[in-house]
Image (spheres, rainbow, N blue to C red):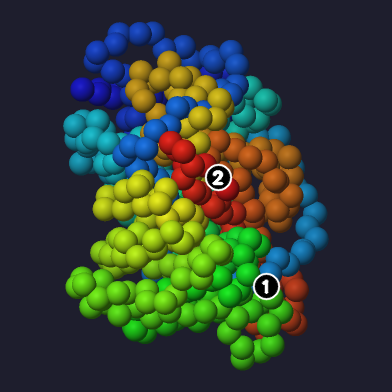
Amino acid sequence: MISVRNLLQPLSGNKIFVIFLISILSFTSCKTKKKISDTPKTRPSTSQPTRPGPKSKVDTIRWTESVLDNADAIVVEQSAEFKTNYKLAILIPFESNRYEPSQFERFGSKENRFANYYNGVKLALEELEREGANFTVKIIDSGVGNLNPKLNQLKDFDLIIGPYSRDQLKETALFCKKNEIVNVSPWQASSKIAKDNPYHIQLRPNQTAYYDAMVKHALSKYDVDQIWMVGRDTKTDSGRINYFQRSAAALLNTPKGQNPLNEYIVDVDSLINDATTYDELFIEDKENVFLFPQWSSEDEPFLYDCLRKLAVEKGSNDLVVYGMPVMIDSEKISFDYFQNLDIHVTRAKWVDRHDPKVKSFRKYYFDRFNALAEDDALDGYDMMLFIGANLIKDGKTFQHTLDQDNSRYLQTSFDIQKVSLSETDRLENFNKIDYFENRNLDIIRFRKDRLIRD
């Protein structure tokens, strides 16, 4: 059982003040009565033994738009504006009006995820305080009541993080643009939230970033004649394959109109009967590389059947498979497939539990909150350290220099790029910025008894 105690008191010290509009979210276990120190003596240096087990769903992606082209980075000169104190607001959908203690204990529940995320943010704020940050932080429950009056209280703030809801995020992005406040979106991935808005930072890569990373990695290791793009005879898969072809053509400088990669349209009926699916596709004495662009939970049965048939038909041929995060999140696709088919998965965030820094963080988190840290706690910690440290370093216009931060955080790095969705704007107006987007992605594969970054 997990009980929740009031956190109305400020953080330790007098430089960061946290104003809570809700009274939840530091965990205390009923099993262990242990005093929690509010003044950590050292920075959580953060790894953890990993065996194939329950698969993390921390990389859940919310995509709704169709495949779009993304822009190259645009360089804009900005003058820095520094303050002695920065005011931050964090909008998290705690839905405290419907608070149920049991939900905080249930792994994977929304309440559990956001509680972990919040606690990770809190630890990062404390660390930034020890390093000299002077922040005033306001935590707002965006899951209760109308958002508009809450936003109107933040007109003199320097930074707003969140909210989670897509509709609320659109409202917040417009508010921040009007009032020249930086808005960080930690959870949503969309090219339709912000338009002509240099104050909006999207920390989740768009769908096309995953495709670009997959194609780039495959082409860096294999010849084009080894690579097959796999899909169904549907409009959706055709659009995905077309984007892959454009991405590969750009990397290979292929003449316009030519598709450099092999395409293979699966006979879906062959996946469920005794017919051969992949026929004479395999090349002997070379790795056979298959790229699967399908990413949603609705694609999971198709992906599972494709991988099952590949494992049966491969014989002695060497195979390499590339896929989206759904392959790791799937309950059907076991780690036997990862090893047998050398599956590579593109992920934005992934926790290496062998990393000593991750181990240290989890121990420190348990000592502080008497609860186990889920991956969302590391997510919140990374986000707040990344944003907070760069705000201190570069001032109120820090979003224009985020591309200079190449640090490796607990579960990810950030590759922030300036995006303009219009081809005309990209070619004729180099100052045009629709929003800033994180494009960093890792390629994860299975080796021996665990997942590793490739």
**Residue at the (74%, 71%) spot, across then down:** 431
Residue 238 is at least partly visible in this image: yes
Q: Nearer the viewer, residue 318 or 336?
A: 318
Say which amino acid is labelled 1. Leu
Above or below, comparing residue 74 to residue 66 in the picture: above
Label 2, label 1: how many angstroms apart (C-alpha)? Answer: 23 Å
Quadrant for the N terminus, please: top left
Badge 2 density bin: few <14, some 14–19, many ≥20, Cα 10 Å: some
Position above or below: 442 against 420: above
Q: Residues within 10 Å of mark 1 (few under 14, many from 20)?
A: some
Q: In terms of secondary structure, where does tag 2 sit? A: strand
Q: 317 or 35: which is nearer to us?
A: 317
Residue drawn at x 60%, y 73% as measured from the top left:
224
Name the spot of residue 135 as percent of width and height, x first.
60, 33
What residue is pinned by disc 2? Answer: 453
Disc marking residue 212: none
Quarter residue 439 falls in:
bottom right
| N-term mark: 2 or 1 | 1
Judge by depth and name the residue closer to the eye, 62 or 344: 344
Residue 373 position in % (x across, y down)? 40, 29
Can the viewer see residue 422 in this picture?
Answer: no
In the rendered picture of this protein, how many numbered marks are placed on residues?
A: 2
Circle 2: residue type: Arg
Residue hosting label 1: 251
> Height in image: 270 above or below 126?
below
Callouts 2 and 1 close, C-beta under 8 Å: no
- At horizontal 37% and vertical 77% (from top left) the residue drawn is 279
Label 1: element kind: helix
**Quadrant assignment, res 450:** top left
Q: Position of residue 420 (x, y in %)?
A: 63, 72
* Residue found farthest to the bottom: 257
Residue 313 at what x, y percent from top left? 35, 65
